[in-house]
Amino acid sequence: MPQKTKILSALAYVVFVIPVIAKEHRHDFVRFHIRQSIGLVITVLAIQGIISVLGWWQFTYALTFLGAPRLLLVWALRIYWIGMMALGAYRAWSGEKKELPFIGKYAVKL
């Protein structure tokens, strides 16, 4: 596999538009990693939205018990996101075509 394909696949986890701009999105390996990246972004943003709604409820309905756990959930989600980005980029760089844990099997269907 060409080095350019591996690099663009790894960059897909940071900015998934780069392989599309470079016109390498037709390659199956690059497309796989773009889908994994987009699936990761969609999942994290959806969970972040749910956490934000819970935060809004905290102020609206005076659910003060959600304050600290909500903050911990947000930071745990961010650490998960960074970890999955690093894992996906590493796998792409090394030429592996493995799904990301938890979300990979759903991201393939995108």
Image (tube, rainbow, N blue to C red):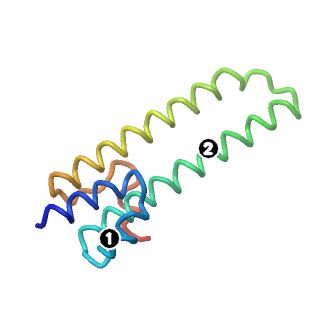
Nearer the viewer's eye, disc 2 or disc 1?
A: 1
Compared to 62, does 22 lie above or below? Answer: below
Please name the amino acid that badge 2 sits on: Gln
Whole-percent x, y for residue 91 in the image: 22, 51
Residue at left 28%, top 54%?
Answer: 10
From the image, tell me which residue sits under label 2.
Answer: 48
Residue at left 40%, top 57%?
Answer: 37
Residue at left 63%, top 26%?
Answer: 71
Mark 2 burial class by Cα count in 10 Å: few <14, some 14-19, many 20+: some
Residue at left 71%, top 23%?
Answer: 67
Compared to 87, does 17 lie above or below? Answer: below
Q: Residue furthest bottom?
A: 26
The answer to whether residue 30 is left or right of residue 34 is: left
The answer to whether residue 50 is left or right of residue 56 is: left
The answer to whether residue 35 is left or right of residue 32 is: right
From the image, tell me which residue sits under label 1.
Answer: 31
Whole-percent x, y for residue 102 in the image: 39, 49
Mark 2 to mark 1 CA distance (whole Å) = 25 Å
| Image quadrant in which you'd find residue 19 | bottom left
Q: Earlier in the sequence, mark 2 or mark 1?
A: 1
For label 1, the SS is helix
Q: How many marks?
A: 2
Whole-percent x, y for residue 13 in the image: 37, 53
